[in-house]
Image (tube, grey):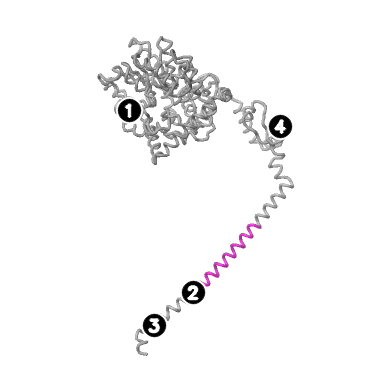
Amino acid sequence: MSTFLGMPAPPPRSPYGTGNLRGDRAFPRAAHDELGNEQLRRNLGRATGTIRAKRLNVTGELPDWEALRDAGSAIKTDTMNRLPELLEQLERKVTERGGTVHWARDAAEANAIVARLVRATGSHEVIKVKSMATQETGLNEHLESVGITPYETDLAELIVQLAEDKPSHILVPAIHRNRDEIRQIFLDHIPGVDPDLDNVPAHLAAAARGYLREKFLTTKVAVSGANFGIAETGTLAVVESEGNGRMCLTLPDTLITVMGIEKVLPRYQDLEVFLQLLPRSSTGERMNPYTSLWTGVTPGDGPQDVHLVLLDNGRTAALADAIGRAALNCIRCSACLNVCPVYERTGGHAYGSTYPGPIGAVLTPQLAGMHAAKDDPNSSLPYASSLCGACFDACPVKIDIPSLLVELRHQHTEQTGVTPEKLAMKAAAAVMRRPGLYTAAQKASALGRVAAGRDGTISRLPPPLSGWSDSRDIAAPPRETFRSWFASDEGRATLRAAASEQNSDHTEKNGKQAEQDSDHTEKNGKQAEQDSDHTEKNGKQADRNSDPNEEDAT
């Protein structure tokens, strides 16, 4: 046995090159291409606008909506503060109820555990409930590589899988597809589909239902994610809208659940809060059509071989960040995506990660890091935001995403070596410390007027400043600096006139004050005269009172 002396090593991030937490290109390049897709922008604008309106309607119905958000935030913060002990309690309770708990340090380990469990059943097929965790680990690709065929049963996930596409939204993975595109995907990839299939949503859903029904009834192994895991009881929860989850969670013999360790909640009672927050924030519904809860194994009812895979994959590293750990409070509702102006125009694929949008721009760098390789695409994600704050307002657990993005930008700047931006800031600091150089630089800036257009702005600058001017216009420098103007005859005359006007205003103000004081003195004099009359009247009354029989005697 050896004893380690020294500083503990930081928790590991998700390993580079595994899973789906890193794209191939930086966000600006990927977003540039997506912005040219007009159909994508129309699809996203229509879908996010509809969801936003529904969400506002149902959240506005609750007088205690803000109190619910406060409660959700407090519960999640408490959970992160006690995460190790809650996970151990969850493991103990699941085991007591006949389930088996597995711990996965990263995506590769989680995929290997699931593949081993599936092979042990003798099955070569699995049906899947929509799961962000398994999308994060790249489970489908791994299962296919070892001869196991996964079938997505969520309608949107099925569309993405059949098209060999990638999800672009946390809640609605196929949000970037319209009905005509979906119809063609079904015609091309679903065996035996009616060739006369039209684009009516009910008919498209019926075609998918017919394709999946056989899978539900014949596949013996299911893989799911989990929205919540209750430490107090060992209960797991999945909420969904189509009923496919209920089929996967009850019909197969074996159920394997992959859950991120941050999804644990302390008490069963906590579901009261989150089953109100989640559906209203995600789908704009008062409650989910299907809420499935299961606790271990129930003899003779449902799956008899139940497994829970607890996935870290960088979550402990995020937890170790005193500021960034707040991103782990996310309940995957996607409300921040639906209000984000950047996401609405670029879509989810530009982010390159399983988690797109504002929360993805925070969570992905926390899980996988920003400097795992040279020119790491994740390093651009914290800048994929206008910092408008709409995501903070929409988040049901009040994650301050804009502040987290700013913190990640700070971390990126600190960890990055010499860059043109750093050199420019150092040069600016050197100039500003020397008055002579600063004055000369101000005078030289006037030459920039040559590049200005008729509207008085500069729309294009040479590299590396072109990164700024590609998306912004710059006001042309003034003809002379403030210092030059201040020292000129015009400047001195303007200052004298301003001082004279100020003195005049001050004199007028003093005159008005004196007049008010005079009025006040006159008013006090009248009051004193009234008081004197009142005193005299009281004196006479006192004389009369001193001799009450005087009138009778007279």
Q: Nearer the viewer, residue 361 or 227?
A: 227
Q: Earlier in the sequence, mark 3 or mark 2?
A: 2
Q: Amino acid at mark 4?
A: Ala
**Residue designated by label 1:** 230
Q: Nearer the viewer, residue 332 or 496?
A: 332
Q: Is residue 477 left or right of residue 138?
A: right
Residue 279: x and y in percent read 40, 31
Residue 256: x and y in percent read 35, 18
- Report the Cα–Cα distance between label 2 and label 1: 81 Å
Quadrant location, the N terminus: top left
Q: Amino acid at mark 2?
A: Gln
- Report the Cα–Cα distance between label 1 and label 4: 63 Å
Picture disc at residue 530 = 2
Residue 252, quarter of picture: top left
- Report the Cα–Cα distance between label 3 and label 4: 99 Å
Disc 1, SS: strand
- Assess whether residue 77 is covered by the magenta stretch: no
Q: Amino acid at mark 3?
A: Arg
Marks 2 and 4: in contact by CB < 8 Å? no
- Report the Cα–Cα distance between label 4 and label 2: 78 Å
Picture disc at residue 544 = 3
Answer whether residue 370 is visible to the viewer in this image: no
Disc 2, SS: helix
Q: Which residues are magenta?
A: 504-526
Disc 3, SS: helix
Answer whether residue 445 is visible to the viewer in this image: yes
Q: Residues within 10 Å of mark 4 (few under 14, many from 20)?
A: some
Marks 1 and 2: in contact by CB < 8 Å? no
**Residue designated by label 4:** 451
Residue located at (37% from left, 82% from top)? 546
Position above or below: 471 against 185 = below
